[in-house]
């Protein structure tokens, strides 16, 4: 009897109901297969279930490092092997794994080795990210300038009132108001600069190529982690 193979795309939200349905119907979970997408850096997960002469595959596409995938090990215990593997090799985030090795299922020289792309493609992606960051920074600067232009002007100095004051006192009042206006303008400029996104640091692949591969991987991972932290801080400042 020929094996019938089917494929169906699902979402992360569908996974919980799917595992209970398959268990209730007597299906075995035979694998969870991970595919990395070089174009956008995401991953696809394919859950394969088998029963009688049918092999049913359910794919979750476009998983990013921000997505959290619920574990199916509460129903299919043996899936902890596939889930730990997908985490260690591809960086897929799972929640609630029955036996969670926390990134130590494999003894690896570098994190997420199956997500490695060619230096040329990596450089092209980093260049695109820098261009996008520069555009965002320019847009933020233009927005800040527009908001500053639309903001109420600094309070005008009422020279008619100052005219009735002692000349020395009038000069002090005028200087104080001008200083206040400058401080407020400086604060507005600082706020605009803080809100503008900073371009990600450039990873010099030429220098890394001359290093020990394991050390180069650690340096690259450290720079990428730094870029993520800076992006998170910028997002927090923007939300304040």
Image: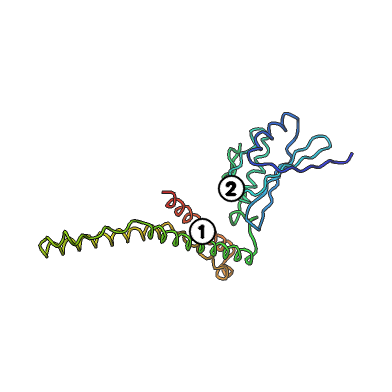
Mark closer to the observer (2, 1): 1
Residue 91 image point, x, y percent: 60, 50
Q: Is 100 on the left-hand or right-hand side of 194? A: right
- Asked whether 33 or 84 is in front, the reply is 33
Question: Who is closer to the viewer here, 233 or 112?
Answer: 233
Disc ID at residue 113: none
Query: In which quadrant will I find the N terminus?
Result: top right
Q: Which residue is mark 1?
A: 222
User: Is residue 171 left or right of 97 when viewed as pictured?
Assistant: left
- Label 2 sits on a secondary structure element that is loop
Residue drawn at (71%, 43%) of the image: 9
Mark 2 or mark 1, earlier in chain: 2
The residue that disc 2 covers is 104
Q: CA distance from mark 2 to mark 1?
A: 19 Å
Residue at the image point whose x is 67% and y is 39% from the top: 79
In front of the other: 99 or 74: 74
**Category of crowding for the residue at label 2, using alpha-carbon neighbours closer than 10 angstroms: few (below 14), some (14–19), many (at least 20):** few
């Amino acid at each position: 009897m020929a094996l019938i193979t089917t494929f169906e795309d699902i979402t992360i939200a569908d996974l919980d109901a799917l595992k209970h349905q398959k268990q209730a119907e007597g299906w075995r979970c035979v694998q969870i297969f991970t595919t990395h997408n070089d174009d956008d850096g995401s991953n696809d997960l394919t859950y394969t279930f088998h029963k009688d002469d049918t092999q049913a595959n359910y794919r979750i596409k476009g998983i990013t490092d921000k997505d959290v995938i619920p574990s199916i090990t509460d129903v299919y215990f043996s899936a902890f092997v596939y889930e730990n593997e997908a985490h260690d090799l591809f960086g897929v985030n799972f929640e609630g794994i029955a036996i969670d090795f926390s990134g130590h299922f494999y003894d690896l020289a570098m994190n997420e080795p199956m997500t490695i792309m060619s230096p040329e493609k990596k450089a092209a992606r980093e260049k695109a990210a820098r261009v996008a960051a520069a555009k965002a920074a320019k847009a933020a600067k233009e927005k800040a300038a527009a908001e500053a232009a639309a903001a109420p002007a600094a309070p005008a100095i009422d020279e008619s009132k100052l005219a009735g004051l002692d000349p020395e006192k009038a000069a002090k009042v005028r200087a104080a108001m001008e200083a206040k206006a400058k401080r407020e303008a400086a604060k507005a400029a600082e706020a605009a600069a803080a809100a503008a996104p900073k371009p990600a640091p450039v990873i010099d692949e030429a220098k890394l190529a001359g290093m020990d591969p394991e050390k180069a991987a650690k340096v690259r991972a450290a720079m990428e982690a730094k870029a993520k932290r800076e992006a998170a801080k910028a997002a927090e400042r923007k939300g304040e």
